Amino acid sequence: MPDREVLDVDVLIVGAGPAGLACAINLHDIIKQHNNTNPDKALKQPTIYVIEKGVSVGAHILSGAVMDPQGLDELIPDWKHSGSPPCHKVDSEEILLLTHKRAVPLPAPLIPPYLHNKGNYIISLGEMTVWLGEQAKKRGIEILEGVPGAELIVEGTKVAGIRCADLGVGKDGKPRSTFQAGAEIRAKVTVFAEGVRGSMTKQLVRYFNLDNDRNPQTYALGVKEIWELPEGAFPAGKVIHTLGFPLQKGPLEGYYIQEADLGMFHTPIGVGLTATDSFGGSWIYGVDATHISIGLVVGLDYKDPYLDPQYEFSRFKTHPYMRKLLEKGKLVSYGAKAIAEGGYYSMPRFYGDGFCIVGESAGFLNAARLKGVHLVIKSGMLAAQAIMGAIEKQDFSSKTLGRYEDYFQTSWAREELYQYRNWRAGYAEGLAKGAVLDLAQRATKGKGFTDPMKVKSDPEMLERFSVHHPDHQGLARFMPDGKLTLDKVTDVFHSGTNHAEDQPCHLKVPDLDLCVQRCTEEFGNPCQHFCPAAVYEWIQPTKVADIGTPDKGHLQINPGNCVHCKTCDIKDPYGNITWTVPEGGGGPRYNKM
C-alpha cells in the first residue's frame, strides 16, 4: 500500500463554493491591506489551499440564482466591472397563486416584504463561482479540483486537517492498478465550506457535539431545470414565485378523476396525486433573453412517504400557465439540491480548536427570502477575519477562532437571520397556521407567540404508509410525455452527472434487511420516491419464495445516477443511508446552473 503524501499548509478550505472562495479571497485581501497599512507589523501571507470534490470549480453548484448583492459588494466592491459573468437586475416580479387551472396574481398588499427583490440580480451561481475561483487564483491561492475530503484528522480536541479520499479503489473495495492513496493535508486552520449537509461537516458536528441545545437542522429539496425559449417568450430580469398547486391541495379530486378518465395514469388507483399538503413553492426567473430557470422547492418535513419531489415538479410543469410558457421551449439542464432551511436556531457552533464552518454547512441561509448567496459570502469573510487574528497571535485555539462568532453577532448577517429565526418553524405547523404565525412574527421582529419555536427533524415528521394509503398501494402517476415531463433517468442525463463505474458505492446502506423487513411495511420504501435521480430502485418480487412467504422485493442502488442532493442522507426514516464522497470529480456538472 503506497504511503500517503503529507502536505502542510496554513489554511485549508474544504469546498470551492462561494463561502469557501470568499473566505480565501478575503483572508488574502485583509492581510494585504494590513501589511500596506502597518508595514512594521507585516504578516506573511499564509499558504491557502482550497480542495473541491467536483471535477472543476462550479461543477456542483446549483442555485435558484436571485442574489442579494450585499455580500459580493463587500467582498469585491467592483465586481460588476471586473469581468464577472453577465447578470440581470430584477426589474419586475410577481407572486402567483396556482389553482389546478388558473394562475392568480397576488395583490401587492398581500405580498410579504421579504419576498420583494428590488435591487437583486438574477445570476448563474455556477458561472459566478467559476469567476470567484479565478479571482482566488489571481491572488495565488491554490485550488485542487477533483479532490474530495473523506476523513477528519483530530488530535485531542483539535482538528489538524483532513485525509482526502483514495483513488483507484474497485467495487470490491480492493485497490486497482491505478490506486493512489489520498493525500493527508495538515493545516493550522481547516475551514469546512462543503455546502448543505457536508459529509465531513456532519462528522465534525457529531464528534464535537456542535449542535447541542440547538434545533435540528431542517431542509427542503429544490428541483430545477433551465429551459431555452424563443426570444421574447419571457423577459430577462423578471422574477415569479408561486404557491398552491401542486403542493398545497385544494378541492381538486374531481379534476384528478377527470385526468384518470383520460388515461393519463399508468396505474388506475387513487383519486389524488399529492396525498397531503406540503410546504413549498416554485419559481420562474428570466436569466437572459432566451433562457429561464424554473424550479420547485419541497420542504422535507412532509409527512406522506410516497411524496415524490421530482414528480411534483413534473406536475408543476403541466399546469396550463407553465405548459403554455414551455410548449415551444427546449430543456437545457436539470439538477437537484437540498437546502438548509432551519435558520438561526438550527445553526451549529461553527468554530473550535483548529476549525471554522462557513456557508450553508453552518446554516447561513434565509429561507423566508429564498436567499443565501450573500449570507454564505459574508460567513466566509467573518471567518477570514477570525483566522487573520489567529495568524497574528499564532494561536489557532477555539478561544481565538471564537472571534468568528463575535463578528457574526455584530454583523448584518446575524441581524437578518435573527429577524426570521422562527419563520420556517412556523410553517412546519401547516400552511394556514404558518401564515398566522408569519404575521405575528413580522409584528414582533421575529419573536411571534413562542420564541424559540421547537421543531422535529425531517425524518421524524414522516408518517407511516398506512396513515396515508390505508386502502391501496400508493398514488396514481401519469406517464412522462418525454418533452415537457421526463422520467428521472432522462432528467439525470441533463444534469451531466458522471461517476467512475468501477468504484465502491458511495451511498452506504449498512442494514439492507431493515429495508425489506421493516421499511417496506412501515413506510413503503420512501427512498424510491424522495430521491430525484432514481438512485434507489425497489425491485418488485417476481415469484413466491420457496418457504411459501411472498417475496417482498429488494433495494437496488444506482450510485451512478447520484446528483449529490443529499436528500437520502436527510430524509431516510431510520438514518440507514449515509452519503459519502465518491471518487474525485464524480457527480453532476452544473456550471451553467
Image (spheres, rainbow, N blue to C red):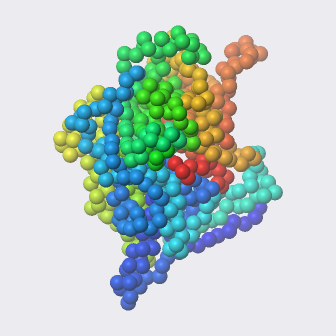
Q: Is residue 501 above or below residue 531?
A: below
Question: Residue at horizontal 68%, vertical 47%?
Answer: 499
Task: Answer whether residue 343 is visible to the viewer in this image.
Answer: no
Q: Is residue 231 above or below residue 585?
A: above
Residue 89 coordinates in the image, percent (x, y): 36, 52
Q: Is 290 displayed left or right of 551 in the figure? A: left
Q: Is 127 displayed left or right of 461 in the figure? A: right
Question: Residue at horizontal 54%, vertical 55%?
Answer: 58
Which quarter of the figure has residue 565?
A: top right
Task: Answer whether residue 411 is visible to the viewer in this image.
Answer: yes
Which quarter of the figure has residue 319?
A: top left
Q: Is residue 37 above or below residue 449?
A: below
Q: Is residue 134 above or below residue 569?
A: below
Q: Residue furthest left?
A: 443
Residue 377 coordinates in the image, percent (x, y): 41, 59
Q: Is 281 displayed left or right of 116 in the figure? A: right
Q: Residue furthest right?
A: 177
Which quarter of the figure has residue 492?
A: top right
Question: Residue at horizontal 33%, vertical 42%?
Answer: 93
Residue 1 coordinates in the image, percent (x, y): 77, 61
Give 162 or 344, whichever is nearer the viewer: 344
Question: Residue at horizontal 59%, vertical 25%?
Answer: 481
